[in-house]
Amino acid sequence: MPKTVQLFLFILFVSCTSNALFAQDSSINPKLLSKYKSNADVFLGYDSFGYSYQIKNNVFSKTKGTELFEYKNVSLGKITKVDLQNPLKIVLFYGDFNSVVLLDNQLNKMTEINFSQSPTPIVVDAIGMSTQNQLWIYNTLNQQIGLFDYLKNEYKTVSIPLTEPIKYYQTDFNTFNWIDKNNNWFSCDIFGKITSNGKAPDFNKIEIISTSQYIFSKDNILYFKGFDKTNSDVISEIKILEKTFDNFYYKDQILSIFTATDISNYKIVTP
């Protein structure tokens, strides 16, 4: 056999072997911990005290065992967004009425804010809990990110105007993360510093874990994006039992899968 053919076959063998190893290493097999029936319209997740949160017929509820707390406000329309970062101060956003309600840990109303009546004109398109009695706000009137002090009823803009519409956003106390319509991922801190975090893959749903990790779904397949041991980008398929699902939630290595009838909780160890 000519040496050129031998070399070609060797390279082909190494390439196929590498691809096979990558395919094997690029999947995550989580362990199923529990599965139970659910008739909720939307499953929102858990808190550190073991309570689950959901919406059914536009009624927001919190449950654990036989405990049940509920909150509904028919005058404000449909619940658009829920922020569970602080289970002692939960944020419910009602987009149709440009309003937010803050609830305590028993789902009693603490504060209700109508941003249309704010001293500074605000039309909210994104919202989340921040630090020091403040809420993250994306104001569509000026296309800027700001902070609203709900005790002082004061609003301040912190970012420059965004140039592209927001496709997805997620907040924590110190950071407003968003992915624009071109899948570019940015973050803004409470001082207005904007950081580019690269480009996200095309997704149906996504949940940001850190500045370098996220879980996303595409065509009913779940993926984890992070780094391998060599600090290289890696995207791994998460092998769950469900063939279709409505939503997912991740916290503290627990991945929850929400379908029309069930909630499954998996233990997941990411690379």
Image (cartoon, rainbow, N blue to C red):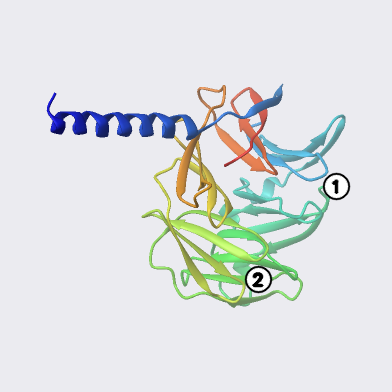
Residue 239 drawn above or below residue 202: above
Q: Is residue 93 visible?
A: yes
At label 1, the amino acid type is Gln
Residue situated in front as seen by the camera: 92 or 245: 245
Residue at 70% x, 44% y is 252
Give residue 28's position: percent from left, percent from top: 55, 32
Q: Residue beneath label 2, please?
A: 148
Residue at 59% x, 65% y is 137
Residue situated in front as seen by the camera: 98 or 87: 87
Give the quadrant of the C terminus: top right
Left or right of 173 on screen, residue 97: left
Mark 2 crowdedness (10 Å alpha carbons): few <14, some 14-19, many ≥20: many
Residue at 46% x, 44% y is 234
N-terminal of the pair, mark 1 or mark 2, is: 1
At label 2, the amino acid type is Phe
Q: Is residue 38 visible?
A: no
Q: Residue beneath label 1, please?
A: 106
Give residue 57's position: percent from left, percent from top: 66, 34
Give the quadrant of the N terminus: top left
Q: Secondary structure at mark 2?
A: strand
The numbered disc on residue 21 is: none
Give residue 5's position: percent from left, percent from top: 15, 29
- Which quarter of the picture shows residue 51? top right
Residue 143 drawn above or below residue 254: below
Residue 139 drawn above or below residue 207: below
Residue at the farthest right position = 66
Mark 1 crowdedness (10 Å alpha carbons): few <14, some 14-19, many ≥20: some
Total numbered badges shown on the rendered structure: 2
Q: Secondary structure at mark 1?
A: loop
